[in-house]
Amino acid sequence: MEQLMKDFFLFLSKNKALNAAAKKWGLRFGANRFVSGETIEEAISKVRELNEKGLVCTLDHLGEFVFSTEEANESADYCIKTLEAIYKSGVDCNLSLKMTSLGLDISRELCINNMRRILEFARDHGNIFVRIDMEDYAHKNITLEILHELLEDYSNVGTVIQAYLYDTVGDIEALKDKKVNLRLVKGAYKESPEVAFPNKADVDENYKKIIKQHLLYGNYAAVATHDDAIIDYVKKLEKEYNIPRTQFEFQMLYGIRTQTQIDLANEGYKMRVYVPYGNDWYGYFMRRLAERPANVAFVLKGMFTK
Ligand code: FDA
């Protein structure tokens, strides 16, 4: 039943008509539990509130389905506006983005040009770090190729490695000497057993393996999970191998396990909250529901209270 619901919400997340309609609705159905606001002003104000609680943030301007060069450039402009707002407001925050929204599916050159524009602005305005979110497997190799190219010229960029993929150990090994800051996650997309572990237990095991691998290489890890077993594992590694707290951080999504986020910050860990904003919230919201159908209860409540 749970798998059926997951598939249903992932199916809904790809519905272009609903996505287009939702932009006009405003944040509805309880989406404001997971999306910080529609405007950059609202997002910065949420980031400031989180900073006051001891949490650092990464902002993501939501965007789905980019079909034209104009849309890709507009999306890059939004990233730059977000960086400008972070810089001017002085909040403790960096930026996350998706390369498909910068035109990756249109042309590699368009995407790289947009990435360079963003990274240069970020470097010149407080050297803000920019994280390339990892999308589905079809985009994995090209994302890593582009990252390797960008690392030749910029040090304020990193990406995400997904533990559910068989390739991960090799991908981390290939980045070892570049000293890159990697966000490590379980993986959120529906992938075939040809490329990804179908069993959750194997994903969890591989997740632990790559966290250890990356940390013992001496490189910076952002461990992005809501799973206590993984958080405890990182704490165990910290003690066992004397890993300094400046070499890793935890990350969680806005609106999920908020008290745990505060507890980890109070324990002295760097805790970064992924804060999405924008009017293109529909796909992101559906993916959160797919991840945890228990959240549907919030949606039902939202439908009657909005
Ligand atoms: P998992 O879903 O296995 O849950 C384990 C346990 O955690 C649960 O049993 C429960 O106890 C607790 N838990 C989980 N969700 C909860 C909730 N909503 N409320 C309460 N408890 C909950 N993926 C990707 O493919 N590319 C990317 O770029 C990113 N980026 C990213 C950034 C950040 C900051 C995060 C936190 C996650 C991502 N992800 C991602 C998503 C990631 O791959 C994964 O799908 C989700 O984090 C869910 O996996 P968990 O590790 O949280 O544990």
Image: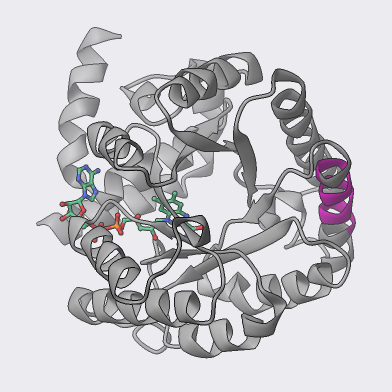
SS majority, magenta: helix
Choose top left, top right, bottom left or bottom right for residue 160: bottom right
Does residue 39 sit above or below 102 in this rendering?
Answer: above
Rendered-image quadrant of the C terminus: top left
Is residue 61 visible in the rendered image? The answer is: no
Rendered-image quadrant of the N terminus: bottom left
In terms of depth relative to the viewer, which is nearer, 85 or 246?
246
In terms of depth relative to the viewer, which is nearer, 225 or 9?
225
Residue 186 pos. (x, y %): 36, 67
Does residue 42 sit above or below 125 in this rendering?
Answer: above
Within the magenta stretch, is there residue 289?
no
Does residue 306 sit above or below 68 in this rendering?
Answer: above
Residue 154 pos. (x, y %): 83, 61
Is residue 283 visible in the rendered image? The answer is: yes
Residue 118 pos. (x, y %): 82, 46
Question: At 77% across and 21% down in the image, what residue appears?
Answer: 88
Question: At 90% across and 56% down in the image, what residue appears?
Answer: 113
Quadrant of the image where one finds ligand 1: bottom left
The range drawn in magenta is 113-122
